[in-house]
Image (cartoon, rainbow, N blue to C red):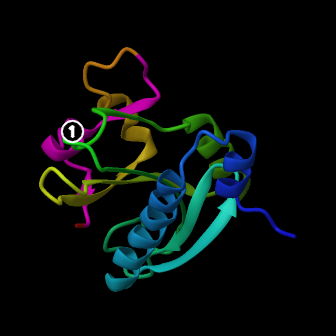
């Protein structure tokens, strides 16, 4: 029986709620859907370090005809706060996958709220820009959601 990374996380840490697992699946599917609508070839892949493999044959979003591995993080909150201001990325795993696949590494972020304002947003950015997107966070392996909206690197792509 194949066990997905999300199922394995739930088995090893039963405190993870089903909403967290579902928001992760939703985030991956949503990013894959938005990319495919823009003509990017995508495959959801359960692999250490990334969730989606993509090839942009037209070069609209990613480097043309390069394999792109995308790690997707989703934060959908049902509280009055929209979501935590920073999201851990796990860049070491993504960097290892990038090397194995000889790929370009990107990060996909889906954030939203089901109560406050029913908001939803989806972003993509190159992993190499992570250092410029952590805002005032002490940890360097996080992205600040407010930085995604402000887009200081001019390389954050807002898909939705």
Quadrant in which the C terminus is drawn: bottom left
Tell me the residue at 43%/19% (across/down).
139
Quadrant in which the N terminus is drawn: bottom right
Q: Within the magenta stretch, is there residue 135?
A: no
Q: Within the magenta stretch, is there residue 158?
A: yes
Which residue is label 1 attached to? Answer: 81
Seen from the viewer's position, the closer of residues 133 and 5 is 5
Total numbered badges shown on the rendered structure: 1
Q: Is residue 155 left or right of residue 1?
A: left
Q: Is residue 10 left or right of residue 158?
A: right
Tell me the residue at 53%/55% (across/down).
104
Q: Is residue 92 left or right of residue 160?
A: right
* Residue 31 at x, y percent in the picture: 40, 68
Seen from the viewer's position, the closer of residues 48 and 14 is 14
Q: Residue furthest right?
A: 1
> In which image quadrant can residue 108 be found?
bottom left
The magenta span reads 139-159
> In which image quadrant can residue 130 be found?
top left
Q: Residue furthest top?
A: 138
Seen from the viewer's position, the closer of residues 13 and 120 is 13
* Residue 32 at x, y percent in the picture: 45, 73
* Residue 90 at x, y percent in the picture: 56, 37
30 vs 47: above or below? below
Tell me the residue at 52%/71% (across/down).
54
Looking at the rendered structure, the secondary structure element under dot 1 is loop
* Residue 34 at x, y percent in the picture: 34, 75
Mark 1 neighbour class, 10 Å CA radius: few under 14, some 14 to 19, many 20 or more: few
Tell me the residue at 23%/60% (across/down).
120
81 vs 2: above or below? above
């Amino acid at each position: 029986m194949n066990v997905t990374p999300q199922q394995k996380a739930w088995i090893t840490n039963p405190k993870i709620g089903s909403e967290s697992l579902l928001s992760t699946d939703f985030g991956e599917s949503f990013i894959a859907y938005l990319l495919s609508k823009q003509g990017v070839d995508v495959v959801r892949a359960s692999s250490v370090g990334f969730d989606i493999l993509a090839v942009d044959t037209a070069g609209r979003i990613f480097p043309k005809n390069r394999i792109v591995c995308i790690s997707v993080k989703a934060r959908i909150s049902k509280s009055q706060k929209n979501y935590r201001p920073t999201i851990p990325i796990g860049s070491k795993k993504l960097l290892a996958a990038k090397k194995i696949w000889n790929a370009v590494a990107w990060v996909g972020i889906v954030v939203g709220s089901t109560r406050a304002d029913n908001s939803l947003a989806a972003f993509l950015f190159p992993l190499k820009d992570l250092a410029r997107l952590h805002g005032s966070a002490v940890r360097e392996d996080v992205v600040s959601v407010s930085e995604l909206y402000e887009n200081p690197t001019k390389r954050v792509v807002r898909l939705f």
